Image (cartoon, rainbow, N blue to C red):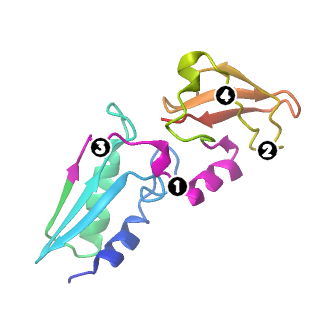
Amino acid sequence: MMYSEKEIWSILEEVEDPEIPIINVVEMGIVRGVKINEENVEVTITPTYSGCPAMKTIEDDIAEILREKKIGNFHIKTVLSPAWTTDWMTDVAKEKLRSTGIAPPEQTSGDKGLLMGKVRDVSCPRCRSKNTQLISQFGTTACKALYKCNDCLDPFDYFKCI
């Protein structure tokens, strides 16, 4: 059975990010492209960072859903360049993060202020206060930092701009 490119994208939206299952791999910006050539489907993916431990699971989950949909001839291609950036996350993904207590990236990846020692203003995903403080550059996963809200006192993860 042959699908259109739009249908393949829709199928891929069923694949959850294994580290943040409320977001799918399309919303996360991991799926970079879909090409259909004759009877072959090529899905291009980019890891959120080169050492991301979830990429094998993501690749396996994509392969599994393509097989479930009776797409027999497919290839999953991993590309590292250009490097993934939080700019590729959809607004829907960022709102899903916020709704579950994870502060989404608030700047673009072009913001390099942190490298110059500039403190990043991060809004609390629960009360929206900017009165927050960095506790640790390392949160529950490598792509998150741990913050605390000084108003509601809740700790929360911040998805770092990459």
What residue do we see at 70% from left, 44% from top?
101
Q: Quadrant of residue 16?
A: bottom left
Q: What residue is drawn where x is 63% and y is 35%? A: 158
Pointer 3 or 4: first along the chain: 3
Q: Position of residue 8 (x, y in %)?
A: 32, 72
Q: Which residue is mark 4?
A: 120
The residues bearing labels 2 and 1 have C-alpha atoms spaced at a distance of: 18 Å
Q: Which residue is mark 3?
A: 56
- Span colored in magenta: 77-104
Classify residue 39 as left or right of residue 160: left
Pick whichever of labels 2 and 4 is earlier in the sequence: 4
Cβ–Cβ under 8 Å for marks 2 and 4 = no
Quarter of the picture containing the N terminus is: bottom left
**Residue 21 in the image: above or below residue 110:** below
Spatial separation of the CA atoms under disc 3 and disc 4: 32 Å
- Label 2 sits on what residue type? Arg
Mark 1, Cα crowd under 10 Å, few <14 / some 14-19 / many 20+, is many
Q: Is residue 13 above or below residue 38?
A: above
Q: CA distance from mark 3 to mark 2?
A: 32 Å
Q: Which residue is mark 2?
A: 126
Which one is earlier in the sequence, the residue at label 3 or at label 1? 1
Query: Is residue 92 shown in magenta?
Result: yes
The 10 Å Cα crowd at callout 4, few under 14, some 14 to 19, many 20 or more, is some
- The amino acid type found where label 4 is placed reads Arg
